[in-house]
Image (cartoon, rainbow, N blue to C red):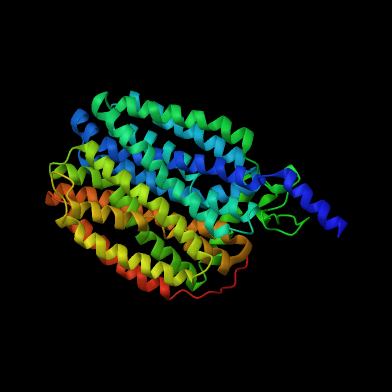
Amino acid sequence: MIGRMTTTLHARKRGLHRAWIVAGVAFVAILGAAGFRATPGVLITPLQEEFGWSRGTISLAVSVNLMLYGLTAPFAAALMNRFGMRRVVSGALLLVAAGSGLTILMNAPWQLVLCWGVLVGLGTGSMALVFAATLTERWFVRHRGLVTGILTAGGATGQLVFLPVLAHLAVAQGWRTAAVTVTAAALVVVPLVWFLLRDRPEEVGATALGAEPGAVTAAPPARAGGAGRAAAHALGVLRSAARTRPFWLLAGGFAICGMSTNGLVGTHFIPAAHDHGMAEPTAAGLLALVGIFDVAGTIASGWLSDKVDSRVLLGAYYGLRGLSLMILPSLFGATAEPSMLVFIIFYGLDWVATVPPTVALCRQIYGAEGAVVFGWVFASHQVGAAVAAVGAGLTRDHFGAYDLAWYAAGFLCLIAALMSVAIAKKASLTV
């Protein structure tokens, strides 16, 4: 009895669990990464007007960015196991700052691909959602789904914070000012990550939130060895997971998720609205509203993923998203009519609500390697996003409108809904 009372008093003295501080720092980093990735959508029209580049050409840089953002993720998860989250995320922020800052010197399309496609893609990819999956796996036992939802919502919040500001800067002071702003924001976050983020609870004499006293976070096999060993482990996980049916259903559905969010809406909503006479700051404001409602939707999805079958959640999310995208072409106009606002609210609630149940399924099916498996599933998300980004740009160049892209994405979402409910809850994984 006395021992229990002493433990309780010590817990009260400690106050806020360190896991919440670490999650807060991660939220800021993920928030910034989302804002950095959202910037190309604001810059498409200004770059087209200044350099005369086609939307297909500019979309290629966005496509490379999205592709690398996803393909970097599984290797970033393995590198975090080897070198720690703090080092990987700090280095990623420096890459983003370099890539964004160098764009102000460019005068050819290949330079846009190199700076915004390669450097920013690699940097933001290292702060992708596998960062959230890795962190929650190490620091949380209780509230894991909820925290995953909150960190995922950080992506939407980044869009909310950055898009209207960057759109205003691009219109009022030029796109170069917007690019420099992204550089400064990335550099400001580096000290916060370096001094406050910690890789595991044991480093500060704590245990994961909700874990038994004295419990130690298990280190995955990739923790030993160098960067090459980490990469080899990530590839080994892919080879093993690729032999299982749930992986392909998860990856296929998430590829369609990327097509219908980052690749299509995130990249082309602003120029599509501009085609119908809407001012770019107004369109950016609407896309930012998606971010507002996605915060609520994603946190709610994280809470639900702790209580409801994740397959059912994914089926509902994809199905409703598909129907909404099929309606979108009829809603565009020079002003934001009530019908468009209804779409924004509905679509916002569903924007990345798919992430918490997808993370939960990877964890349930693949156990300790769930974060790395999710990295590969997330890579498929960004491959889908990259295909949609360049495909929608070419569709607009060829047909003069985006309508076909919206309808195709809606149809694919209905297929993703069917794929999601067919996922089995168990699979063997040997690395």
Q: Position of residue 340 (x, y in %)?
A: 21, 52
> Who is closer to the viewer here, 206 or 381?
206
Asked which quadrant contains residue 335, the reply is top left
**Residue 404 vs residue 104: left or right?**
left
Residue visible at 31% across and 36% down? 164
Residue visible at 19% across and 55% down? 339
Q: Tell me, yes or no, if residue 429 can be seen here.
A: yes
Looking at the image, is 123 positioned above or below residue 382? Answer: above
The quadrant of the rendering that contains the N terminus is bottom right
Please identify the residue farthest to the right as the structure is shown. 2
| Total number of numbered discs in the rendering | 0
Asked which quadrant contains residue 254, the reply is bottom left
Q: Position of residue 202 (x, y in %)?
A: 74, 47
Looking at the image, is 221 positioned above or below residue 127? Answer: below
> Who is closer to the viewer here, 307 or 159?
307
The quadrant of the rendering that contains the C terminus is bottom right
Residue visible at 31% across and 46% down? 289
Q: Position of residue 117 (x, y in %)?
A: 37, 39
> Who is closer to the viewer here, 71 or 131?
131
Q: Position of residue 405 (x, y in %)?
A: 22, 56
**Residue 403 vs residue 146: left or right?**
left
Asked which quadrant contains residue 100, the reply is top left
Residue visible at 52% across and 68% down? 307
Q: Tell me, yes or no, if residue 386 can be seen here.
A: no
